[in-house]
Image: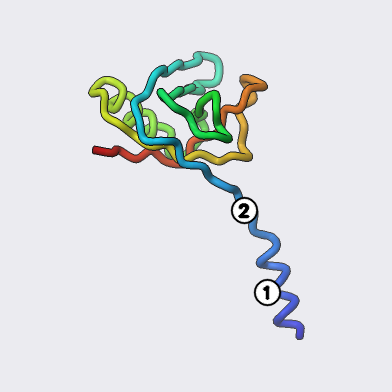
Amino acid sequence: MKKYFTFLILLLSFGVSATEESPTGLIKRIQAYSVHGDVFISMETNGQQCSTGYFIDKVSPGYESILSMLLAAYQANTPISIFAYEDQRWSGTTAPVCKIFSVVYAR
């Protein structure tokens, strides 16, 4: 019984964040901010929960690789999909802008 409760406590202690995948498409807008280094991205069609767009902040461990992929996709007009955390919203706006988890090139 003690093992059961220990397992249950461990299971409940892990946070679960829902992610949303954007429709595959082209990047419409990239906007960088100088104060904190945040980057805002808007697709031709954003996801339902992240209807205004997506962001990546400078303190994210994958910031440089995500930004590199986004810039390359924007310049080459390469279709992408963005996976974003629905529950991690950008403090730079009250509009639904979600934190990027992953970027995927699509052909």
Is 74 positioned to the left or the right of 50 in the image?
Answer: left
Residue drawn at (27%, 26%) of the image: 72
Label 2: which residue?
A: 16
Front residue of 35 and 92: 92
Residue drawn at (63%, 40%) of the image: 87
Identify the element where label 2 is drawn: loop
Label 1: which residue?
A: 7
**Residue neighbourhood size for the residue with mark 2, other residues' Cα within 10 Å, grouped as few (<14), some (14–19), many (≥20):** few
Q: Which residue lies furthest to the bottom in this view?
A: 1
Residue drawn at (58%, 35%) of the image: 49
**In the rendered view, would you say 6 is above or below 59?**
below
Q: Where is residue 88 in the image (x, y as percent from the top left)?
A: 61, 37
Q: Where is residue 32 in the image (x, y as percent from the top left)?
A: 46, 16
- What is the three-letter code of the residue carrying label 1? Phe
| Image quarter (top left, top right, bottom left or bottom right) of the C terminus | top left
**In the rendered view, would you say 12 is above or below 5?**
above
Q: In which quarter of the image is residue 65?
A: top left
